[in-house]
Structures are given as structure tokens and as C-alpha cells.
Image: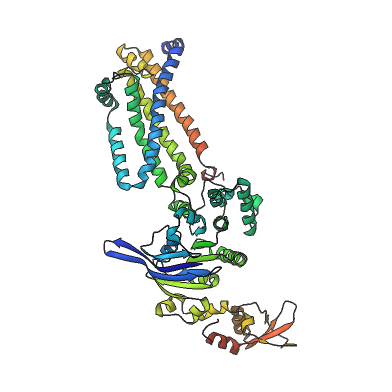
């Protein structure tokens, strides 16, 4: 869906040319979320901003849906790409409904259609349309404003979303909530998303694939579990953190490691469900000093058993897929 | 008491002079808005040009108005308009430029870069971005510049009475030449009230034009 081909951005500085983005090639499949991850100044935001042509590439090509974006008019191109930024950038002179309606307005939708679309999006984001449509941005909390920012990017139903640290300005609690909401929405909408972050936990949570950047170069691009299991080099290993094994636990579900059991289980002690992730399993192993747990469906039926040995084997297996 | 009687007897003349005064200020500020606002927006594109334009504007502001009239007389005499309404309007218009250009420039420059980035990233063309985002947000500050220009111009136009432009300054110039304290006070009082009235009217307009979402919220 999105293909970057040897994309570079070189800035002239007093110390000579500086490659902010250096020959980055990357493909993001339709419906996939790819998180561009790295320390500040690594070129991830510049890469993102080249895709909607806010920054002109020095060399290289960008294809969206197979079309070379050089051939497109930048203004027309941007209207087909949802864009969310950390500072949110809601226009203070417009109401929530008008903010959401910006791109539809540019595309010439009628005012009733724009308003209906705004209502629909607010409802999808768990905000009461009657209460929020006519508010101004300064009457919103940070979390509400960021949800409106996402709604605005989705307004014209673009196939591609570019998100530049969209949840970076929120407090940790709010961030988790919005991330969960967004994941739920994305499962429905299946947009092709490029998402910039400097937070490994956020990346592991949101990404189908993570692209790690360092000094303008793409160092490794892999599924979160692969990245955590097999960092390509010392930089990636350092960036994902020494607790990378613990991070992997969140990515693995009980159903992936449990041995199927028919009939009654051990019967006592704490249980888990097949959809729990291994963080819960590890916590129960440690707090209850257990080596095995029963795995129970919502109706109370014991369906499997998860053991320390199985978890260890799963973590040792280098990656899924 | 004498002055009050003078004022009451000369109300129609005061009214006439006020209209003259406002016609000069109105035309001058009107032209200054039509030229200064686009100029203020245009110079946001280049720091260097902006510095030059604002510097030239400041130089104009330092010229005493009476000297500016002096310069305009020989130039405009060529078209037979050396004194009177036209030089007054031109001088007032020049003095109105700086506050309007500077406020427009500053207001547009101060629009949060994130808003500009969002507007461009969403696919607004430059005119759309100016019309829908930057100018509405900058408008209160632009109107504040217009307020300053109007108050300055009421003062400049008072002096234009000396080059035969009429207006409320006529009472003051005659009061001085005829040592008539009644006319002096009448002129000063009328000018002061006019300046305050215009300032308040524009302040009201400035508040009206402030986008609802940018108004300070009641607690």
C-alpha cells in the first residue's frame, strides 16, 4: 500500500550536508500498522512528513497504492491521507464539528453530510455528539481533544493515516485508554497506518511491524515479537530495553502456549482465560508460586493448562510466524 | 461657562468639522487597511523583506506630521492639490501603515506552527489556510492595529487643519491665532471625545471578531 524506495532527505548545514533520512526503503501492506521508532532526531518524523509532502525528499520515491506521489498534486494528495500530530492542532476558531469537517469541506461535501459524518465519528470514539459537536477546542480536555484530532484525520475516510506521536502529550492513564480505543477502531477500519513513536511500549502495543531508526537509517523492521526476540544489533537491543523478554509476554496469548485439556483440571487456585496475555500468567506464577495454571473459558469450562516449561519454550522459539 | 455657550451655539459647525475629520481618518485608514493587511500577510513569507518593510514603516513614524505636510505640499502642488484634503489623507494613510502592517505581520507569524502544519497536512491551499485558519485567528490583533492607527490619525488630522484640510483641528488653529480660549477648549475637547469614542467602538468590534473558541472563558 505504501512503499518507500531509497528515500533520502539531505539538509545543507554549515558543517556540510547532513542526511536526516538516509536511503530508507520500507513497505507497509494494506491494513497494516507500522510504527517508526527511534530516539529524537533519528529521521522518523522527517520520513513521515515526506509521505504527505510536508518535506520534499532529496531523492528516492514514495508510492501509495502503487501510485508515485511525485506525480500527484501535493494539496490533492494530502486530502487523501489522514494526518494526526502530537500537538493535535485543532483550529481554535472552529467548533468540534467544523474541525472534523475540514477535509470533507475541502472535498466539497454538503454541510449536512459533514455534520452527519462528524456525529458518526464522535459516536465511534465514545464521545456524545449532542454534547461535543458544538464545543470549541478550548472546552475539551487533552484526551478529548486528541480523540477529535483522530476523528478529524478519519473524516474523509482516507485509506492511509499518518500519525506523528499522536498520544505523546497525554498522561499515561489517558494514553492507555486512547491506545486501546484506537486499536479497537483499527480492527474495524483496517487503515494503512504509519505511526511515529519514541516509546517502545507504545510501539509493541500498536504495531504489526516496528521500523527502528537510528541517525536517519532504517536499522531493523520486523514484527514486535521478532524485534524483541532477535534485535538486529546492540543499538536495537539497547533501545528495546533489557526487559525485552517481559515486553514479549504482552504479545503472546495463553491460547498460543496452553496444552489442551479435556475434563476437569487441577480444580483449585487462580485461573487464566485463553485470551489473557502471558504477563498475567507470569504474575500468577510468581505471586502464587505455581508452575502451572488452569485455563478456563468464560463459562467455567477448563480448556487447557499453561506451564512454566511451555512459556519458556515459547520464549526460546525465536519468533512466531 | 463662556466655552459652554460657545459650544452650544456652534453645535452644527462642530458636527460639520467632526464629519470632515472622520472623512479624512476614514478614507486614510480604509486605504491603509486595504494595503497594509495584504502587505503584512505578504511579508510573513520572508524575514528579510519583513525587516526592511517594518524598518521603513518606523522611519515614516518618526517624521513629525507637520514636516510630512511640508514635504507633500511641493509634490502635490504639481497636480494642484498642495494643500487641503488630499495631502491630509495621504499623510494620515502613511502614519496608519506601520501599526496595521506590523500587527498583521505579528499576528500571522504568531499563529501556532502546529496549526499551520495541521492545515497544510490536511490539504489546504495557501489561500484556504489564510482564509479559514490564519486570518480568523489573527483578526483580533489586526483590529488592535487598526485601533492604534485610528487614534494616531485623529491626532495627525488635527494638525492637518494648518494645511487647510478642515476638521476639528480648525478650532484649535483658530483658537491659537485669535487667542480665543473658547475655540481652543472646544477643539481639544471634541478631539479627545472623538478619539475615545472611536477607540471604544473598535474595541467592541475587536471583541466581536475574536473567534468564540479563542475568547477567554468565563470561569
- What count of labels does the image hold? 0
Position of residue A44 relative to residue B54, above or below, is below
Position of residue A65 relative to residue B161, above or below, is below
* Residue A143 visible in the shown view: no
Residue at 35% across, 22% down: B158
Residue A108, how many percent across, how many down? 56, 48
Residue at 41% across, 19% down: B20
Residue at 52% across, 52% down: A90
* Residue B25 visible in the shown view: yes
Q: Residue pushed farthest bottom?
A: A309
> In which quadrant of the rendered view does residue B155 lie?
top left
> In which quadrant of the rendered view does residue A11 lie?
bottom left
Residue A206, how many percent across, how many down? 54, 69
Query: In this view of the protein, which residue sits in the foreground, B58 or B183?
Result: B58
Residue B86, how many percent across, how many down? 34, 22
Q: Quadrant of the C terminus of chain A?
A: bottom right
Query: In this view of the protein, which residue sits in the foreground, A196 or A4?
Result: A4
> In which quadrant of the rendered view does residue A250 lie?
bottom right
Left or right for A217, reference B212: left
Left or right for A317, reference B33: right
Amino acid at each position: 500500500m505504501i512503499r518507500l524506495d531509497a528515500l533520502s532527505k539531505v539538509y545543507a548545514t554549515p558543517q556540510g550536508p547532513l542526511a536526516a533520512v538516509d536511503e530508507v526503503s520500507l513497505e507497509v501492506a494494506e491494513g497494516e500498522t507500522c510504527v517508526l521508532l527511534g530516539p529524537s532526531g533519528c529521521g522518523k518524523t522527517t520520513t513521515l512528513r515526506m509521505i504527505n509532502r510536508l518535506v520534499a525528499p532529496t531523492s528516492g520515491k514514495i508510492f501509495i497504492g502503487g501510485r508515485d506521489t511525485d506525480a500527484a498534486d501535493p494539496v490533492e494528495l494530502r486530502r487523501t491521507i489522514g494526518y494526526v500530530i502530537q500537538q493535535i492542532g485543532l483550529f481554535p476558531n472552529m467548533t468540534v464539528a467544523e474541525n472534523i469537517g475540514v477535509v470533507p469541506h475541502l472535498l466539497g461535501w454538503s454541510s449536512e453530510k459533514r455534520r452527519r459524518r462528524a456525529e458518526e465519528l464522535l459516536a465511534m470514539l465514545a464521545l456524545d455528539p449532542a454534547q461535543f459537536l458544538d464545543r470549541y477546542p478550548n472546552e475539551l480536555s487533552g484526551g478529548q481533544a486528541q480523540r477529535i484530532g483522530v476523528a478529524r484525520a478519519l473524516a474523509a475516510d482516507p485509506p492511509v493515516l499518518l500519525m506523528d506521536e499522536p498520544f505523546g502529550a497525554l498522561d499515561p492513564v489517558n494514553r492507555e485508554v486512547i491506545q486501546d480505543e484506537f486499536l479497537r477502531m483499527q480492527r474495524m477500519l483496517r487503515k494503512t497506518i504509519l505511526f511515529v513513536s519514541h516509546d517502545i511500549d507504545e510501539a509493541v502495543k500498536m504495531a504489526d511491524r516496528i521500523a527502528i531508526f537510528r541517525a536517519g537509517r532504517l536499522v531493523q523492521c520486523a514484527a514486535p515479537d521478532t524485534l524483541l526476540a532477535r534485535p538486529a544489533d546492540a543499538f536495537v537491543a539497547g533501545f528495546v530495553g533489557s526487559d525485552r523478554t517481559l515486553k514479549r509476554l504482552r504479545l503472546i496469548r495463553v491460547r498460543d502456549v496452553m496444552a489442551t485439556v479435556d475434563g476437569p483440571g487441577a480444580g483449585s487456585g487462580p485461573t487464566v482465560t485463553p485470551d489473557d496475555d502471558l504477563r498475567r500468567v507470569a504474575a500468577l506464577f510468581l505471586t502464587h508460586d505455581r508452575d502451572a495454571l488452569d485455563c478456563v473459558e468464560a463459562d467455567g469450562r477448563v480448556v487447557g493448562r499453561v506451564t512454566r516449561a511451555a512459556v519458556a519454550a515459547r520464549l526460546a522459539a525465536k519468533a512466531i510466524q | 461657562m463662556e466655552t459652554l455657550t460657545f459650544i452650544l451655539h456652534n453645535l452644527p459647525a462642530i458636527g460639520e468639522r467632526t464629519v470632515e475629520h472622520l472623512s479624512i481618518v476614514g478614507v486614510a485608514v480604509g486605504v491603509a487597511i486595504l494595503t497594509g493587511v495584504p502587505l503584512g500577510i505578504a511579508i510573513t513569507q520572508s524575514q528579510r523583506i519583513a525587516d526592511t518593510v517594518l524598518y521603513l514603516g518606523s522611519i515614516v513614524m518618526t517624521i513629525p506630521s507637520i514636516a510630512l505636510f511640508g514635504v507633500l505640499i511641493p509634490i502635490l502642488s504639481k497636480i494642484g492639490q498642495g494643500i487641503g484634503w488630499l495631502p491630509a489623507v495621504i499623510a494620515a494613510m502613511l502614519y496608519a501603515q506601520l501599526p496595521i502592517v506590523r500587527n498583521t505581520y505579528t499576528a500571522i507569524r504568531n499563529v501556532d506552527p502546529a496549526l499551520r502544519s495541521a492545515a497544510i497536512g490536511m490539504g489546504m491551499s495557501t489561500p484556504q489556510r489564510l482564509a479559514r485558519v490564519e486570518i480568523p485567528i489573527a483578526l483580533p490583533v489586526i483590529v488592535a492595529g487598526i485601533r492604534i492607527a485610528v487614534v494616531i490619525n485623529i491626532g495627525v488630522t488635527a494638525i492637518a487643519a494648518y494645511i487647510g484640510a478642515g476638521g476639528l483641528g480648525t478650532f484649535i488653529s483658530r483658537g491659537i491665532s485669535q487667542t480665543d480660549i473658547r475655540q481652543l477648549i472646544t477643539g481639544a475637547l471634541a478631539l479627545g471625545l472623538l478619539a475615545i469614542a472611536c477607540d471604544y467602538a473598535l474595541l467592541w468590534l475587536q471583541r466581536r471578531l475574536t473567534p468564540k473558541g479563542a475568547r477567554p472563558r468565563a470561569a
